[in-house]
Image: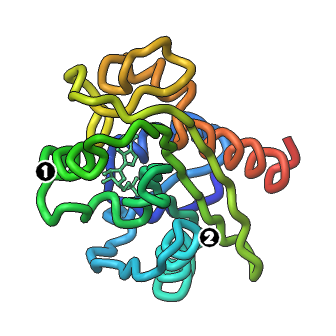
């Protein structure tokens, strides 16, 4: 029987992506699959803190080994904002978030930014963290139709001027913050926890 591990998310796309990597060795269960419908608190001011909070909630209430992620956009000229507040930056949706971001950067020549993901893994007592970062620039207007969140205004430095929203999902995953953190995490889990 495969070993069960919970990914503390309700995002079907994220679950699918991780299950595709870990699926041979682990049965990856989402929150819905374990009957967790709670709105798990995320009150930390760091990505690692929020990811750990979610993993700890599942461990405490359901007893499973668990991992969780937290991501966001950190803009150099805004001292790392919106950071952990990326989803809630404007109080509206992605369109309003991008509008607020572009407005706050009006007239600023410094356009550097990065997306960051931290995954917290709880197996045993001590949490382990895995981080992925992708550097790029905030472009002056929205470009592309794909992706989600801030993708239309973020051009990763590896993509020759394309925004994340102009890339295929595969091309984005290969260089993205989430893709990089997931790769490190999966390598660790498969090697250290299954001996492969
Ligand atoms: P989450 O922790 O993965 O849910 O990400 C939190 C927020 O950061 C999202 O709601 C988006 O606003 C932003 N974000 C995280 N990853 C991405 C990405 O790959 N593209 C665009 N926005 C992202």
**Badge 2, how many Cα within 10 Å: few under 14, some, many 20+?**
some
Q: Residue at x 65, y 57 (%)?
A: 3
x, y percent for residue 97: 20, 52
Q: Secondary structure at mark 2?
A: loop
x, y percent for residue 69: 50, 59
Distance of label 2 from label 1 (alpha carbons)? 37 Å
> Quick check: 55 above or below 57?
above
Tell me, yes or no, if residue 119 can be seen here.
yes
Q: Which residue is mark 2?
A: 65
x, y percent for residue 37: 26, 75
Residues 141 and 60: in front is 141
Q: Which residue is mark 1?
A: 96
Q: Residue at x 41, y 45 (%)?
A: 14
Count of all numbered marks drawn on residues in the image: 2
Q: Residue at x 38, y 26 (%)?
A: 164
Residue situated furthest right in the rendering: 195
Evaluate if marks 2 and 1 touch, with contact meaning CB atoms under 8 Å apart. no
Residues 86 and 4: in front is 86
**Coloring scheme of the render?**
rainbow
**Badge 1, how many Cα within 10 Å: few under 14, some, many 20+?**
some
């Amino acid at each position: 029987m495969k070993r069960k591990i919970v990914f503390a998310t309700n995002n079907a796309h994220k679950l699918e992506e991780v299950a595709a990597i870990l699926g041979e060795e682990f049965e990856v269960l989402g929150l819905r699959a374990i009957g967790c419908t709670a709105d798990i608190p995320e009150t930390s001011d760091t990505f690692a803190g929020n990811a750990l909070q979610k993993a700890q909630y599942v461990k405490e209430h359901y007893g499973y080994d668990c991992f969780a992620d937290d991501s966001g956009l950190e803009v150099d000229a805004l001292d790392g904002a919106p950071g952990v507040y990326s989803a809630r930056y404007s109080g509206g949706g992605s369109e309003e978030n991008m509008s607020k971001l572009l407005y706050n950067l009006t007239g600023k020549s410094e356009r550097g930014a990065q997306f960051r993901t931290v995954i917290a893994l709880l197996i045993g007592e001590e949490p382990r963290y895995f981080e992925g970062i992708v550097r790029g620039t905030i472009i002056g207007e929205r470009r592309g139709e794909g992706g989600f969140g801030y993708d239309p205004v973020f051009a990763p430095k590896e993509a020759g001027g394309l925004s994340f929203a102009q890339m295929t999902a595969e091309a984005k995953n290969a260089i993205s913050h989430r893709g990089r953190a997931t790769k490190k995490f999966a390598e660790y889990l498969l090697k250290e926890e299954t001996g492969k």
